[in-house]
Amino acid sequence: MAYDSNNIFAKILRGEAPCVRVYEDEHTLVFMDLMPQADGHLLVIPKEPAETLLDVSEEGAQACIRVTRRMAIAVKKALGVEGIHIAQLNGVAAGQTVPHCHFHVIPHEKGVVLRMHAAEPVAREELEAMAERIRAYL
């Protein structure tokens, strides 16, 4: 299947759709999930067009996991949570909702049930405040 260059993450990368940026480098972009499963939920995406992890280059995959680890450390410190849930879904059958490779970094406290995936939008102001907290630990 050909990469869909009109998916929301491709539009974000081109500056055609808004996002709350947390971090960016040559190979990756990190932004807050607009419908987070927990406060502080963010997404790490490669800048290259790749639908799944199986499609991204080795260099892109390495950059993503390196940045995912860095973000997980920053989120854990910023929010003081016990755990971090890292998710990476490949294909609709696996629950992938945006056809662009991405890693979820989700703060997780023991006994706290995560919100439904892609279900409840959060106000941009709240996401900006959370992003600022996380950026302080980068």
Image (cartoon, rainbow, N blue to C red):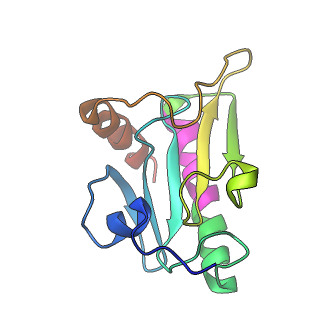
> Residue reaching furthest top?
111
Which corner quadrant holds the N terminus? bottom right
> Residue reaching furthest front?
1
Question: Which residue is at the front of the view, 95 or 69?
Answer: 95
Q: Residue at x 51, y 52 (%)?
A: 43
Is residue 8 shown left or right of residue 54? left
Question: Where 124 falls versus 9 (above or below)?
Answer: above
Q: Which residue is drawn at 75% across and 53% down?
A: 93
Is residue 8 shown left or right of residue 3? left
Question: Which residue is at the front of the view, 68 or 97?
Answer: 97
What span is colored magenta in the figure? 68-78
Horizontal and vertical percent position of residue 32: 42, 46
Q: Residue at x 30, y 73 (%)?
A: 14
Q: Which residue is drawn at 57% across and 81% down?
A: 2
> In the picture, residue 103 is in which quadrant?
bottom right
> In the picture, residue 17 is in which quadrant?
bottom left
Horizontal and vertical percent position of residue 36: 49, 34
